[in-house]
Image (cartoon, helix red, strand yellow):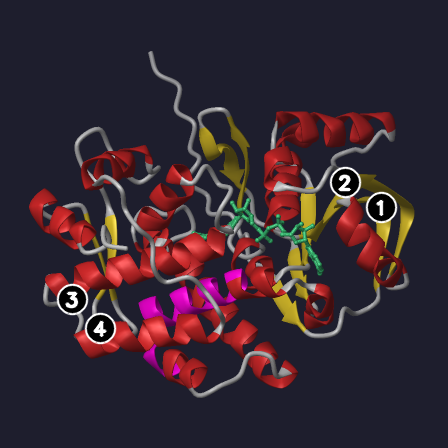
């Protein structure tokens, strides 16, 4: 005997991303703004001048990647239970990618899932982390190993928040913008080459284009069965660099910048990219003071660390290799000797 559950009904998870001055928002439900003391100190007053709700609560968690963990998730959950949040209640992520990922994760598990809104305040979270519904937290086994795909109801990107962002954090966001351009949009890359992202209008346009690029990819492959993996360009190498430097030396976007240079060197070695194109990407990254060099002490150990990547299996490593500018190849079929030869070029001081 068999009982069949037909569950093929498609769900509409569509949502809008507004890139503009934050509009006034009213919610006829309980709302909790999840943030950290730094972002709250700088921008909560502004946010509160824009938001009204039936009941409004502020929940702060400590600032930093090291607090993107179960303890912070528990702290948020406790507060939601104490304030008797229900399935109609709403969370608002107000901060960088750490707050966004954790708020999204909590909203995916609280009473089996409630709505949340992203109001990202770093460049990296505005162009990448707030879009596409990847949520999660870290544990002792690694970064973002626990989580869920849970799309927000809406994303409000207000570039006004970036006025207080430290220069290095700004650069880390630029790296992810360059990533979107190199992988999917040559015209956008050329726009960036000729633009100054410190100009507010130019920055708003770049955010729009980066978000549009990511939105297009997510619409085609929400759960990363294929195409979406291309957004990890620079990350396969970058994650090893972050791991080797114990997450202390580089911001994530900075490690990704070096990782993109390494992926480009691989592309050149494979005949998929011209040396001149690789140089153009390096020049663009350096325009925003992003690091583009790294000294590998031991190429074998660097290579073995690739296997810790979420995209790798026990025996294969998935590489995201650009094909010129604006196109990309996702492959788990690159010869170890070729990669080691490329890595060898990064062993010299
Ligand atoms: P972050 O959230 O740690 O923010 C960086 C620092 O900037 C923090 O100290 C933060 O408090 C501070 N800050 C935030 N807004 C500010 C402002 N307006 N002015 C001054 N300071 C401000 O880091 P991030 O770079 O925003 O995000 C990194 C996180 O995002 C990582 O955990 C990464 O895993 C995640 N991420 C997720 C996705 C995704 O698709 N979900 C994509 C990329 C990255
Ligand atoms: N940041 C990569 C992704 O969202 O898929």
The boundaries of the magenta stretch are 172-187
Asked if ligand 1 lies within 8 A of label 2, the reply is no
**Residue, disc 4:** 324
What residue is at 75 percent from the left and 28 percent from the top? 75
Asked if ligand 2 lies within 8 A of label 4, the reply is no
Closest to the camera, between mark 2 and mark 4, is 4
Residue 349 place in picture, x, y as percent: 28, 55
Residue 88 badge: 2
Q: Are marks 2 and 3 in contact (CB under 8 Å)?
A: no
Closer to the chain start, of discs 2 and 3, is: 2
**Residue, disc 3:** 268
Closest to the camera, between mark 4 and mark 3, is 3
Residue 29 badge: 1
Residue 234 place in picture, x, y as percent: 34, 56
CA gap, disc 4 to disc 1? 49 Å
CA gap, disc 4 to disc 3? 9 Å
């Amino acid at each position: 005997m068999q009982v069949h559950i037909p569950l093929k009904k498609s769900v509409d998870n569509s949502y809008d991303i507004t890139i503009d001055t934050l509009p006034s928002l009213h919610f006829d439900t309980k709302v909790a703004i999840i943030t950290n003391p730094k972002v709250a100190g700088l921008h909560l007053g502004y946010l509160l001048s824009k938001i009204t709700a039936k009941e409004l609560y502020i929940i702060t968690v400590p600032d930093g990647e090291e607090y993107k963990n179960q303890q912070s998730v528990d702290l948020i959950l406790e507060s939601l239970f104490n304030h008797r949040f229900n399935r109609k209640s709403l969370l608002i992520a107000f901060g960088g990618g750490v707050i966004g990922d954790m708020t999204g994760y909590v909203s995916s598990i609280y009473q089996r899932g409630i709505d949340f809104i992203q109001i990202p305040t770093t460049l990296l979270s505005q162009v990448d982390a707030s879009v596409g519904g990847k949520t999660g937290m870290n544990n002792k086994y690694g970064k973002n190993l626990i989580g869920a795909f849970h799309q927000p109801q809406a994303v409000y990107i207000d570039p006004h928040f970036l006025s207080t962002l430290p220069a290095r954090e700004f650069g880390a966001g630029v790296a992810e913008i360059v990533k979107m351009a190199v992988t999917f949009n040559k015209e956008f890359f050329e726009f960036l080459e000729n633009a100054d992202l410190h100009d507010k209008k130019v920055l708003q346009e770049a955010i729009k284009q980066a978000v549009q690029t990511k939105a297009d990819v997510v619409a085609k492959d929400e759960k990363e069965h294929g195409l979406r993996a291309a957004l990890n360009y620079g990350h396969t190498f970058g994650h090893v660099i972050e791991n080797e430097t114990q997450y202390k030396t580089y911001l994530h976007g900075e490690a990704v910048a070096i990782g993109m240079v390494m992926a480009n060197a691989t592309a050149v070695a494979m005949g998929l990219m011209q040396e001149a194109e690789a140089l153009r990407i390096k020049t663009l990254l350096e325009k925003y003071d992003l690091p583009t060099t790294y000294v590998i002490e031991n190429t074998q150990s660097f290579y073995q660390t690739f296997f810790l990547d979420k995209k790798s299996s026990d025996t294969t490593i998935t590489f995201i290799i650009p094909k010129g500018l604006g196109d990309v190849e996702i492959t788990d079929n690159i010869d170890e000797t070729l990669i080691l030869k490329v890595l060898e070029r990064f062993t010299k001081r």
